[in-house]
Image (tube, coloured by chain):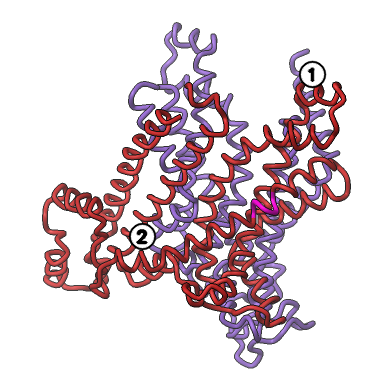
Chain colours: A red, B purple
């Protein structure tokens, strides 16, 4: 296991390097370059050149690239073009909000999704199964921002139960949870839909297996067959999919942060695009990339941990 | 003759199974309805979607304005209908772009194999691990806003997805006897790709492509909602929701109706998808 883990961790380094390189070069393909993106199309040649010099864009590309990588290794994400402030502390300030939202939603999805998946699989083609399937399909089809708006409309505006905007004080637990509820419910309901579907389909597959028939034939109680034999096997693909969904969740958290005006990486990124702050955009993208690579690493490691066959490959 | 009969028999059987699958059938009817509305939008819209009427600003749904009016007095129903046109156009064209480029990439990578093939696929895998929305935001930040650029953006995001889809079957099909025979009698690589490999993988690619139109519509709506897609005054479901969100307390209909349109359309496409999956893979039956 340890050998498998080390190999997998080492493998993430070139993956991360590829993505970071891709982001670096893509940012340099902006029409007219980043300086024009900041100053606008009608900026004078002198102004563009001056800003390029200030941003270090007049140096050869490979020097810029080496500098960029060197800074990243030191944990330096550069300075915002607009405010001139270093980006890393700002990322450090908003990242907990995004992580908090992502993990709480994922947790909600797991808590509701897995039991619902089992429940609908065991009642296949009954009314409750159809209802569960339709609801989970709807959860897959609704845009996160629209679900957020609907929940806000009902719980904040009509019922006045929860705050409309903001994230509250992160150090004040109650205030924090109070603000977190609706955004988490939005993404959590979507995750519930995803996880219900996967669990149901995986359960149905496993229930058809020979070893389930054997377990039943030897007279085991149905509870033991379902929870002891079927569920354990059915959860293997579910856990791997939960990792994939976590990545989808990170994408959707951008929309929810905008709807609820919560601080977070997504809000920071959209703000950077609006202000044409390409340095901030580039840095936020790198942080997102690292998160995605890290989650993929966790998926693989958990897979190796759950399914013993993986380790020996 | 007997082969043909057999094929038609299989098709007939597929159609019968499809008809029995109520979810898929209802989904298909809704999809056809939405497409019809999109095509007929110029004729069935009660008002001009861009026509402003200051006297009837922010009117709630009524007989004169079935879905109410917006802050410029424009009819929401007409804007939703025209929005259908734009959302479907962006969804379909972007998937078409992704399908053509991605399938070409995946097939060539699979057929040529070697280092180039594996480098392409490694890149594809890395790109695939990113959420559609984040990739979309990155590309749109580089390309800039506008409808054509949005189509291109979403298309680019789907390229690796189609490449991955086409790659697997290509690896299998290229090992078949008739591909070897074609090579032996001197058929060119291009002809082998287009006449021997593509017909075998196109079915699967087209089915996935149809279903991904739903995801593309969601992506378009999300980008437009973030202000990175089609800009107002041209109506799209996403930008209508975006402008409506500021008036959620006083005029919720501005956001709710375009949102329901997205939900209905994408849900219908997903229903068809579930039905198709049930038919092609009866073991899964999600």
**B286 within the magenta span:** no
Chain for mark 1?
B
What residue sits right under mark 1 in the picture? B5
Where residue B239 sits in the image (x, y, percent)? 54, 70
**A110 within the magenta span:** yes
Where residue B85 sits in the image (x, y, percent)? 61, 61
Task: Let me know if residue B277 appears in the view.
Answer: no
State the residue at coordinates (73%, 81%): B65
Find residue A264 and name its label: none
Where residue A196 sits in the image (x, y, percent)? 70, 48
Task: Let me know if residue A105 appears in the view.
Answer: yes
Where residue A113 sits in the image (x, y, percent)? 69, 50
The magenta region covers: A109-113
**Magenta region, mostly helix, strand or loop?**
helix
Left or right: A130 in relation to B123: right
State the residue at coordinates (53%, 72%): A173
Residue B74, above or below B160:
below
Q: Give the SS element for disc 2.
A: helix
Chain for mark 2?
A
State the residue at coordinates (47%, 73%): A171
Residue B72, above or below B35:
below
Q: Residues within 10 Å of mark 2 (few under 14, many from 20)?
A: many
Q: Nearer the viewer, residue B193 or A22?
A: A22
Q: Are marks 1 and 2 on the same chain?
A: no
Q: Nearer the viewer, mark 1 or mark 2?
A: 2
What residue sits right under mark 2 in the picture? A284
User: Contact, CB < 8 Å: mark 1 with mark 2?
Assistant: no
State the residue at coordinates (75%, 40%): B275
Q: Give the SS element for disc 1.
A: helix
Q: Nearer the viewer, residue B239 or A110?
A: A110
Left or right: B59 in relation to A95: right
């Amino acid at each position: 296991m340890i050998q498998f883990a080390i190999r997998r961790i080492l493998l993430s380094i070139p993956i991360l390097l590829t993505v970071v390189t891709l982001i670096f070069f893509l940012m340099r393909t902006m029409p007219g370059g980043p300086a024009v993106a900041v100053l606008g199309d009608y900026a004078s040649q002198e102004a563009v050149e001056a800003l390029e010099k200030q941003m270090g864009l007049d140096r050869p590309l490979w020097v810029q690239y080496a500098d960029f990588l060197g800074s990243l290794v030191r944990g330096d994400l550069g300075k915002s073009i607009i405010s001139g402030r270093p980006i890393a502390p700002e990322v450090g300030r908003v990242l907990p909000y995004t992580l908090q939202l992502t993990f709480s939603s994922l947790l909600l999805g797991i808590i509701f999704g897995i039991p619902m998946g089992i429940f609908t699989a065991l009642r296949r083609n009954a009314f409750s199964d159809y209802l569960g399937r339709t609801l989970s399909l709807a959860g897959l089809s609704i845009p996160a921002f629209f679900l957020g708006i609907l929940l806000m409309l009902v719980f904040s505006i009509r019922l006045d139960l929860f705050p409309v905007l903001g994230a509250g004080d992160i150090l004040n637990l109650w205030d924090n949870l109070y603000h977190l509820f609706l955004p988490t419910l939005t993404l959590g309901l979507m995750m519930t839909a995803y996880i219900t579907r996967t669990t149901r389909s995986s359960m149905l597959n496993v229930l058809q297996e020979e070893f389930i028939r054997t377990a039943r034939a030897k007279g085991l109680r149905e509870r033991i067959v379902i929870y002891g034999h079927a569920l354990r096997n059915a959860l293997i693909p579910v856990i791997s999919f939960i990792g994939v969904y976590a990545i989808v969740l990170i994408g959707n958290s951008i929309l929810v942060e905008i709807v609820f005006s919560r601080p977070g990486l997504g809000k920071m990124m959209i703000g950077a695009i609006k202000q044409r702050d390409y340095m901030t955009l580039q840095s936020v993208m790198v942080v997102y990339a690292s998160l995605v690579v890290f989650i993929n690493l966790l998926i693989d490691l958990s897979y190796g941990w759950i399914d013993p066959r993986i380790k020996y490959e | 003759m007997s082969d043909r009969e057999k094929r038609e028999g299989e098709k007939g059987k597929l159609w019968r199974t499809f008809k029995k699958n109520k979810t898929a059938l209802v989904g298909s009817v809704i999809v056809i309805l939405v497409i019809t509305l999109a095509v007929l939008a110029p004729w069935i819209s009660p008002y001009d979607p861009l026509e402003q009427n200051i006297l009837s600003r922010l009117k709630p749904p009524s007989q004169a304005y079935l879905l109410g009016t917006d802050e410029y007095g424009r009819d929401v129903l007409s804007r939703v209908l025209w929005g259908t046109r734009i959302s479907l156009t962006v969804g379909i064209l972007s998937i078409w772009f992704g399908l053509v480029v991605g399938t070409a990439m995946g097939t060539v990578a699979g057929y040529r194999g070697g280092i180039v093939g594996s480098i392409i696929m490694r890149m594809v895998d890395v790109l695939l691990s990113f959420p559609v929305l984040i990739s979309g935001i990155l590309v749109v930040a580089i390309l800039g806003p506008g409808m054509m650029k949005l189509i291109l953006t979403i298309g680019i995001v789907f390229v690796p997805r189609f490449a991955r889809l086409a790659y697997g079957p290509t690896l299998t099909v290229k090992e078949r006897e008739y591909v070897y025979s074609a090579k032996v009698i001197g058929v060119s690589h291009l002809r082998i790709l287009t006449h021997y490999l593509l017909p075998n993988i196109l079915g699967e690619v087209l089915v996935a492509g149809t279903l991904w139109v739903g995801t593309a519509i969601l992506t378009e709506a999300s980008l437009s909602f973030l202000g990175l897609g089609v800009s107002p005054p041209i109506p799209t479901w996403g930008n209508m929701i975006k402008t409506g969100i500021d008036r959620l307390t006083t005029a919720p209909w501005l956001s709710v109706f375009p949102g329901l349109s997205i939900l209905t359309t994408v849900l219908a496409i997903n229903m068809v998808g579930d039905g198709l999956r049930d038919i092609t893979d009866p073991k899964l039956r999600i």
